[in-house]
Image (cartoon, coloured by chain):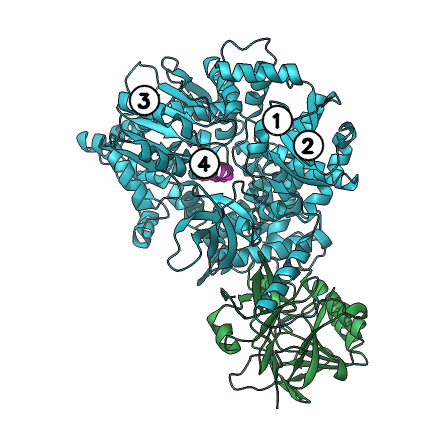
Chain colours: A cyan, B green
Amino acid sequence: MLDAAADPALLLVAPTGGGKTLAGFLPTLAELARDPRPGLHTLYISPLKALAADIRRNLMTPIAEMALPIRVEDRTGDTGATQRRRQRADPPQILLTTPESLALLLSYEDAPRIFAGLSRVIVDEIHALAESKRGDQLMLCLSRLSTLAPGLRRVGLSATVEDPAAIARFLARNPDSCRIVHADPGPDPDIAMLETDAPPPWAGGGGRYAIPAILDQVRRHRTTLIFHNTRAQAEIFFRDLWLANEDALPIGIHHGSLSREQRERVEAAMVAGELRAIVCTGSLDLGIDWGDVDLVIQVGAPKNVKRLVQRIGRANHRYNAPSKALLVPANRFEVVECQAALQAVRDHDLDGDPRGPGPRDVLCQHILARACSGPFSADDLYAEVITAGPYTALSRSDFDACLEFCATGGYALRAYDRWRRLMLRDDRWTLRDPRAARAIRMNLGTIVDTDMLKVRMRGRGGMPLGEVEEWFAASLTPGDTFLIGGQIVRYESLRELTVEVSRDPGRTPKIAVYGGTKFSTSTQLSDRILRILGQDSWPDLPAHTARWLSLQREVSQLPRAHRLLAETFPGEDRHYLCVYGFAGRNALQTLGLLLTRRMEEEGLHPLGFVATDYALLVWGLDPVRDPGPLFDLAGLRAALSGWLSANTVMKRTFRNVAIIAGLIERNHPGMRKSGRQATFSTDILYDTLLRHDPDHLLMQVTREEAMRGLVDFSRIEAMMVRVAGRIDHVSLPRISPLAAPMTLEIGTVSVEGAGRERLLAETARRLMAEAGLESAAHD
Amino acid sequence: MPHLDLRRGGWRAFSCGIMRGGYAFTFGGAALVALPSGALWWPAERLLAVADLHLGKSERMARRGGPLLPPYEGAETLARLEADLAACDAARVVCVGDGFDDNAVELDGDEIDWIARMAKGRDWTWIAGNHDPAAMTCAGHHMPELRHGPLTFRHIASASAQAEVSGHYHPKLRLAGQSRRCFLVARSRVILPAYGAYTGGLSSADPVLASLMDGAGIAILTGQACHPVPLSRPGGKG
C-alpha cells in the first residue's frame, strides 16, 4: 500500500472484510506524521453514513496512540449545521463523507478554498458505487476535485469483482493509469448445497422446508448469517424459524425496512457476540464486519455469483481458514441454479453486466451544481467531465445537449429565452437567478426514494402487515389479491396513506401488477444452467432433481443453449404456451406482456401469464398452433413501442430521471413536496412530452434506462439473437414436468383487455347504489 | 330557493352527441352538465365554466429560477378548451379564477391570439383568483365575481354561499386505484376541478374540502367519462 502511495490512482481489491479500509489510510497517517499541516489532506467517501462514523472511531485509536496532530471528522446528512459551517471555514485533515455530501460541498462558492490542499481521496466499497448513479455522480465530483487540487491521488477499495480493470477505469482520472493491487484472496471458500431430509418444494421461495437443517447448522456454529433475497422472505422465514426454535437460540433479523433503532440494536448485539444467527438481506452486503461470523447461508437462488462471493466473504474471520457457506435452493429449479453457482464460485467465474456509459441525467445535475459554485466555461467543464471514468466517451454534442437542457430546458419549442436558468456572460455560464442555487443544492443526489405505504387490515385497530411501494398500491383495484407478510390479502381501499386490506380465503393471489425486481438471474449463471441441462446425466444433482430432468427429457425436451424451447399443451379449459427463455425475470415479464399483446391481435384470447427467471408460461382460450411468428423480433419491437408509450414502468423511470436531472424538485425551500404530488405531476409531464417533444433529452434517457432496467428489453434482444430463429415447438397432450412448477408460481399478471374505465364505472355505480342514489346507466 | 335533488330522478347521464360521457344534474334550479374534460356546461344559458387554467405556470416557475418545465401546458389547456367550446357551441365562457398563474405572466403571442379567437363572438369573463387578482391584457372582461341567473361564480368558495360555483381547490378523488380530478357537488355549492394541464390536486377527503362539502353530496370524477360517487360513502370518506 505504501509502495504505491505516490500513484495517481490505485485500486485495492480484497475480499469482504479484509481490513482494507484502514490500509487505505496508512499513507495519509504516514504523510501527516512526517509533515504535519493544517487543511484538508484526505477525503474518505463511503456509500454508507454509518460506515463514515465507524471509520472515524477506528482511526481515532492509532491517531491517539501515535499522538498525531490530526483531526478526523465525518460529514453526512446527519451532521448539524454549526459543525458543517465550521468544517467549511476550517476543514479537518481527514474528512469522512458520502457522495451526496461531497456533491453539496462542491456546489459552494468556497469549494476551491476548501479543497485546494487536498492530497488523497479514498473511495470505499467502490464496487457497489460503480453499479449505481451515485458512483457516476461521485466520479464527476472527483473530476472537479482534480481540477481544484492538481496532483490529487485516488484510491479505490473494492470487494472481489469480475473485472477489476473496469473498476480501475471507472476510478482513475482519464487518461491516468491505475495500478491494481490484489490482496491475498485467502483459501477458496468451503461451499456446498445444504442437504435436507425433505426435497425442496416445486415452486415458490423462502426455503421454509429447510428450517430444521438450518437450525441444526446454527447450533453447530458460533454465528451464522442467513441471507435472503427479499425483505418479505426474510420476514416470513424469521417468523417460521422462531416457531421451530425450540432451544430459543438468540436469533435476530436485519433488513432495510426496519427502523434505524431496531437495526442498531441488532448490530450492537452482533458485535457483542450475543447472537447465534441473523436473518438478513442485502442490508448486510456492505459495511463493517459484524461479529464473529463462521457460517453464511444463502436461502434462495443466488441470482448473481459476484454478490454470492461477497456474501460468503462475510464469514472469513479466522486467518487463512476458508469461508464456509451453504446454499439453500428454495425450489426444484433453484437446485439447478445453485449447482451452477457452486461451479461458478469454484471456477472463480464472476458475473456482471457492463453498465454502459454514464447517464446524462446525472451529468445534468452535475452541471447545475457546478453553476451554483460559480461561473464556468463550457470548454473547461467538458474537458473536466471527460476525465471521469464513466464519461470518457461522452461526445461534445451530448454534453452540449445536457448544458442546453440545464440552460433552457432543451425543448423543441424555444420558450425560455428570457427566463433561462443558465446565462452566458463573458463566455462563462452562470445562474441567471442566484437565488436558484438554494433549491438546486437542496435537490442534489441521485437516490430517489420510493414512497412506501403502510398496509393494514381493515377495521378498528387493524393489524399492520408491512409496506408496499406507492406505485404498486396505485395499480391495485378493489378485489385484487396479493401476498404480504406471508398471507394472502384482498385490496379494499386506500385511506389517507394506508392501504386497507382484508383477509382472503383464496389460495392463489392474483397480482395484477407489473412487478419488477432488482435481482434477475445473471446472463452467465443462466448460461451455466443451460449447460447443466445439456448434460447426459446429473450425478452432481440431488436424485429428486435428476429424476425430474430425466422425465422432462423423456416427455418433451430439455432447453438448449442456442435454441428456444416452446411447449404447448392443454389443461383444464385453457391452452398453455411455455417458453424457456432463460433471460431473467424482468425480461421474461416484458416478453409476456409483448407476446400476449401479439396473441390478442391474432385473436388467441390470452388470459394471463407468469414469468420466472427461466421461463414464461402464457395461458389463453385458444391454442397456439405455431409459436414461431409470435417471436418475430420486428413484431416484438413494434409491440414494445406501442406498449411503452402509456406504461407505468416508463412513467416511474421518467420520474426518477426527471428528479435527478432537476426537472422536478423533490425539496423546495420552505416546503417539502409530498411524493404523491410528485408522482402526479411527473406523469403529466411525461404525457405532455410524449405528445409534443418525444425526442426530448429526458425522454431519451428514460427509454435507455427502462430498456436496461425494469423492461430489460436488451436481454430479450440478446436472447433472440442467440436463438436466431431456432425455435423448437413441442406440442404435448398434457403439461410437461419442467412447466408444471410454473403453474404454482405467484405473481401472475392478468391481461387487461377489459379496460380500467369499465372497472371504474362499475365501482362508481355500485357505490351510488349502496348510498341509495340511483344513477341511470350511461354509456 | 337553490336545491340539490339527490333522490331518484335528480341525476341522469347526458349522452347525446359530443357530450357523451357528461353527467347532468340540477343545482340551484339550473340544469347543469359536468363534462369529462372538467368543464361545467349550462345548456339553457349556453354557458361554459372552467376553473384554474393556470396559464403561464411553467413560465412563472422559470422566471423564479426554478425548473424549466415542458412549455406545452398552455397549448394543452387551450386545445382542450377549444374542443369543449366547439362541441357545446357556447355563447358565454366563465373562467372561475386563476386563469393565469400570476399577473406578471407574459403569454406567448400565439396563446393571446388563440384566446382572442375563441373569445370572438362570445361573452367571456375572467373572474379574479388569488393567483391573478388583476386583469390581464387579453380578450374578455375581468370581474371579482359574477352573478348569472340563480348562480354565483367566484374563485374561492365562501362558507355562507348559496348556489355558488367556485374553483381554487383543485379537488381530486381516488377510486378503484385511480386518482382523478373531480367536481364536488353539494346542496349549496359546486367546486370545479382544475382545468389547466400542470395543476396538482387536493384530495376531497382533505378536512378543508370535507368541511366545505359538509360531508355530503357527490363527487363527479372526470376522465374519459364522468363517474359520480357519493361523498359520504359506506366504509369511509374520500
Give the residue displayed 55% in from the left and 33% down from the top.
A744
Q: Out of A424 and B44, give the one closest to the viewer.
A: B44
Instruction: Say the numbered circle drawn on residue A230.
Output: 4
**Amino acid type at image mark 2:** Tyr
Left or right? Give the position of B19 relative to A147: right
Q: Amino acid at mark 4?
A: Thr
Closer to the camera in the image, A304 or A219 = A219
Secondary element under disc 3, as helix, strand or loop, is helix
Q: Nearer the viewer, mark 4 or mark 2?
A: 2
Closer mark to the observer between disc 3 and disc 2: 2
Which amino acid, mark 1?
Ala
Q: Are marks 4 and 2 in contact (CB under 8 Å)?
A: no
Do marks 3 and 4 share a chain? Answer: yes
Disc 3 marks which residue? A217
**Within-10-Å neighbours for mark 3: few <14, some 14–19, many 20+:** some
Q: Secondary structure at mark 4?
A: loop
Mark identifier at residue A773: none
Residue position marked by numbered label 2 in the rendering: A576
Residue A137 colored in magenta in the image: yes
Magenta stretch, main secondary structure, is helix
Residue linked to disc 1:
A739
Residue farthest along the front direction in this orientation: A572
Seen in the image, is A710 located left or right of residue B111? left
Q: CA distance from mark 1 to mark 3?
A: 33 Å
Lower sequence index among marks 4 and 1:
4
Above or below — where is A317 with respect to B23?
above
Disc on the earlier residue, 3 or 2: 3
Question: Which is nearer the N-term, disc 4 or disc 2?
Answer: 4
